[in-house]
Image (tube, rainbow, N blue to C red):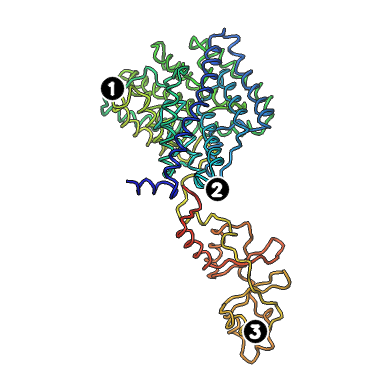
């Protein structure tokens, strides 16, 4: 078992890494608990008690405060949070400045606390990621550089685990989010440890009052109709998630390319109008905040299909406007709320056609799993969230919801295609060999190369280079200018009696393209293969000779990495 555990982690660092992960989880939980308390208990709960005339102004104030925090405290930082984690994950040496954490936490607290339609998990994920990298930086000698991405992922998992009180969901979300079709398996153990520690710490803090997203939604036995409904919800969520992802990504681009104060004022005005309209339609402003009150409204029994459809559109618009106005927060909860509403829509349609059971069955749960899976491309995390959020682990409700939730999530993945609310996601991890191909050309570059001048004779080339140095091909360089390649094969085409009168310049080949220092090893391998060569010259854009890359050097590099365990990426 110990050998298996070590195989999942950088060699020789397993116990240290797990200890660090526990400490990281505790640290993340403490910071996130304060953020959640300030945002929800101190701000949002008071905002929703205000008269609607004042409440409708709060999102604008929150967005302006967020923009000011990012501009002055964050030195012009963007409002992105969970996207920062995904982008850093794909960097060879991930870096997330710790100095930006206060600005983004304040921006998140003002955006969400004052009524922006985003989720708390975004700032939590970002904070956990930064703390993970900071821990690795301070303990670099103890943990090693390979621990950076592992603790980055573990910190993100801890952030989700704390904010949702769902440790398994935290692990799966952190591992699934960087890729649309893959999982970073080597970060599993540190993420498990950090997530569990964060969850236990968070629920132990006395001033925290959990806000279970699914609240009173329940699930009971599953029949054929439920499974067919799961397929229908998966299809609907796939299409809905695809549209949702498209508009969210456009909203992010708007936020990046416009004056933050201006779009905050404009977006705040739109959110205020939505608050007034939703208050008139639903008897309370359900577009304000992350959306927890939507669950209570659905459970009130005062809903109709038309109102649910309107609320679905209103919530999607509120979230889009908040993102496009530069708001700071996550999309996990907004996606989950859209899924719950979608489930109730399909439930109501089936009920009106006498094709389904009562609307308070598992449909909202399936909608949540399918829409979240389609929007964030995290199907396992979505289903795990269902299992951890309904009734209690091991109960009949959970067991009955998981199987159709898996079906709904899987179908939504097929329909959603390549769409995702995160612009930084990659399709899948590169394979072991592919990762090495992405390394810079400098990793296989040989600069200590003997060259031949263009005025050397063929006889000199054969005796000094071909026979004397046992080489088949030599770069021809005039001063520092690269001219081409001279090969033994080209010399063999010259009559032996003419060797002393024929120069290298007369027979050099210029057919082989040159590589540039900015190339990757993959680029060089492609060029070598296309021209059936085992060497390519490397020059600057101005034609100055730098060195050569040999096919044998690329092979030897791979052997060295295999022997030393030095993979390009620890994942």
Q: Position of residue 13 (x, y in %)?
A: 45, 46
Quadrant assignment, res 404: top left
Mark 1 is surrounded, within 10 Å at the Cα level, by few (under 14), some (14 to 19) or many (20 or more) other residues, namely some
Compared with 48, 32 (above or below) is below
Answer yes or no: is residue 144 visible: yes
Quadrant assignment, res 303: top left
Between marks 3 and 1 in the image, the one whose residue lies nearer the viewer: 3
As drawn, the label of residue 92 is 2
Relative side of 245 to 189, left or right: right
Q: Which residue is mark 1?
A: 220
Contact, mark 3 vs mark 2 (Cβ under 8 Å): no
Q: Earlier in the sequence, mark 2 or mark 1?
A: 2
Q: Position of residue 511 (x, y in %)?
A: 62, 71
Answer yes or no: is residue 181 visible: no
Relative side of 396 to 166, left or right: left
Q: Between residues 118 and 404, which one lies in front from this camera angle?
A: 118
Residue at the right extreme of this rendering: 479
Q: CA distance from mark 2 to mark 1?
A: 47 Å
As drawn, the label of residue 43 is none
Residue drawn at x 59%, y 63% as measured from the top left: 445
Q: CA distance from mark 3 to mark 1?
A: 87 Å
Residue at the front extreme of this rendering: 142
Q: Earlier in the sequence, mark 3 or mark 1?
A: 1
Between marks 2 and 1 in the image, the one whose residue lies nearer the viewer: 2
Between marks 3 and 2 in the image, the one whose residue lies nearer the viewer: 2
Residue drawn at x 52%, y 13% as measured from the top left: 45
Q: Between residues 250 and 462, which one lies in front from this camera angle?
A: 462
Residue at the top extreme of this rendering: 51
Q: Which residue is mark 3?
A: 458
Of helix, strand and loop, which one carries label 2?
Answer: loop
């Amino acid at each position: 078992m110990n050998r298996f555990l070590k195989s999942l982690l950088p060699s020789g660092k397993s116990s240290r890494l797990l200890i660090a992960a526990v400490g990281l989880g505790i640290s993340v939980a403490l910071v996130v608990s304060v953020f959640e308390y300030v945002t929800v208990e101190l701000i949002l709960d008071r905002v929703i008690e205000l008269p609607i005339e004042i409440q409708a102004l709060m999102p604008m104030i929150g967005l302006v405060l967020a923009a000011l925090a990012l501009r002055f405290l964050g030195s012009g930082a963007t409002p992105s949070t969970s996207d920062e984690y995904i982008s850093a994950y794909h960097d060879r040496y991930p870096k997330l400045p710790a100095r930006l954490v206060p600005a983004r936490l304040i921006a998140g607290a003002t955006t969400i606390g004052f009524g922006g339609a985003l989720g708390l998990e975004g700032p939590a994920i970002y904070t956990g990621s930064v703390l993970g990298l900071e821990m690795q930086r301070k303990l670099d000698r103890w943990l090693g550089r390979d621990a950076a991405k592992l603790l980055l992922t573990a910190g993100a998992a801890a952030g989700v685990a704390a904010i949702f009180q769902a440790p398994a969901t935290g692990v799966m979300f952190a591992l699934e989010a960087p890729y649309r079709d893959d999982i970073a398996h080597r970060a599993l153990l540190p993420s498990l440890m950090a997530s569990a520690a964060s969850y236990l710490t968070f629920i132990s803090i006395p001033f925290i009052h959990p806000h279970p997203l699914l609240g009173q939604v329940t699930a009971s036995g599953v029949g054929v109709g439920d499974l067919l409904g799961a397929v229908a919800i998966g299809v609907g969520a796939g299409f809905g998630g695809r549209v949702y992802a498209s508009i969210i990504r456009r909203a992010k681009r708007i936020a990046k390319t416009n004056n933050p104060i201006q779009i905050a004022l404009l977006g705040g005005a739109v959110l205020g109008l939505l608050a007034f309209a939703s208050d008139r339609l639903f008897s309370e402003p359900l577009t304000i905040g992350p959306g927890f009150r939507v669950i209570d409204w659905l459970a009130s029994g005062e809903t109709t299909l038309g109102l649910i459809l309107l609320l679905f559109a209103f919530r999607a618009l509120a979230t889009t406007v908040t993102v496009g106005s530069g708001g700071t927060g996550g999309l996990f909860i907004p996606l989950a709320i859209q899924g719950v509403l979608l489930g109730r829509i399909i439930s109501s349609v089936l009920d009106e056609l006498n094709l389904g059971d009562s609307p308070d069955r598992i449909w909202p749960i399936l909608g949540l799993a399918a829409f979240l899976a389609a929007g964030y491309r995290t199907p396992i995390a979505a289903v795990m969230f269902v299992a951890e959020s309904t009734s209690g682990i091991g109960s009949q409700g959970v067991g009955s919801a998981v199987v159709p939730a898996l079906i709904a999530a899987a179908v939504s993945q097929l329909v959603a295609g390549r769409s995702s609310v995160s612009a930084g996601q990659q399709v899948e991890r590169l394979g072991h060999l592919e990762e090495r191909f992405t390394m810079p050309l400098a990793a296989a570059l040989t600069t200590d190369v003997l060259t031949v001048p263009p005025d050397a004779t063929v006889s000199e080339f054969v005796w000094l280079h071909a026979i004397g140095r046992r080489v088949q091909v030599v770069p021809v360089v005039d001063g520092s200018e690269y001219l081409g390649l001279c090969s033994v094969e080209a010399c063999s085409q010259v009559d032996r009696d003419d060797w002393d009168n024929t120069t290298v310049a007369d027979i050099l080949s210029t057919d082989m393209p040159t590589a540039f220092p900015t190339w990757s090893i993959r680029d060089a391998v492609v060029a070598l293969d296309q021209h059936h060569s085992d060497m390519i010259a490397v020059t600057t854009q101005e034609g100055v000779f730098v060195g050569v890359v040999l096919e044998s050097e690329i092979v030897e590099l791979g052997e060295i990495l295999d022997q030393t365990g030095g993979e390009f990426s620890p994942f």
